[in-house]
Image: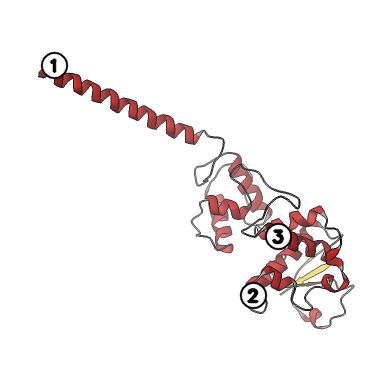
Amino acid sequence: MIGTNQKWKYIWRVIVILLLNLLIIAAFGRMNGSVQTLSKVGSSGSEVRQIQTKLKQWGYYKGSVDGIYGTSTKNAVSDFQKKNGLSADGVAGPSTLAKIGISSSGGGSTGASGGGAGGFSQSDVNLLARVISAESRGEPYTGQVAVGAVILNRIQHPSFPNTLAGVIYQPGAFSCLNDGGINAPVEDSAYRAARDAMNGWDPSGGAIYYYNPKKSTNKWIFSRPVITVIGEHRFCS
């Protein structure tokens, strides 16, 4: 009996050691995998650099793009989450990455066929891009994004419809619907601008109006407080 007990103890030790080794291998596999699906303080790598690049571009992140997820990156992620209705835990999980516009493969999308952004559908991207292209043709890229941001800001404002289509097709809202400009060919930059605006970049500073003082004939719009000027457009509250 003693010999049998020792034999079983030995077998169980081997099984336990094998299980521990399998767990260690699995852990290292997740750490060293090519796709990182959750970034938080202590993380590093290409996904973190993408997060920092996007948030720096949109004004949330002020530090250097070093690929290291430190306190500054966490705070920037938290601010972005608050702005976009996410749980502000400072962790860039799948929902936050999707809002930022970073896919699980770490890539992005451009052009009309590249997919949605910020929780919007591809048809929403196409519609917003059409208006951006028509309303800000010839404007600097930041100004194109700002026009898109104004439209999105209106969705959240109680004085406007609460859907993208509702805001865009609101009677008298955009001249391009009256002069046929919305049917003109859409510039590629307008698709990028639409996605950047949908992913949270707001160069307008929260504006809900914009106008070109050289073209506008609406005296009321001149009375609106100007937040910022980008290109030929003044962005107002």
- Is 228 situated above or below 67? below
Write down the residue under mark 3.
123
Write down the residue under mark 1.
3
Residue at image position (74%, 59%) is 126
- The kind of residue on which mark 2 rests is His
- The kind of residue on which mark 3 rests is Ser
Towards the viewer: 49 or 13: 13
Residue at image position (43%, 34%) is 27
Query: Which SS class for mark 3?
Result: helix
Percent coordinates x, y for residue 166 in the rendering: 70, 73
- Is 217 situated above or below 60? below
Q: How is the image coloured?
A: secondary structure
Q: Mark 3 to mark 2: distance in Å?
A: 22 Å
Residues tagged 3 and 2 counted as in contact (Cβ below 8 A): no
Percent coordinates x, y for residue 46 in the rendering: 61, 40
Query: Which SS class for mark 1?
Result: helix
Which quarter of the figure is the C terminus placed in? bottom right
Write down the residue under mark 2.
157
Query: Which SS class for mark 2?
Result: loop
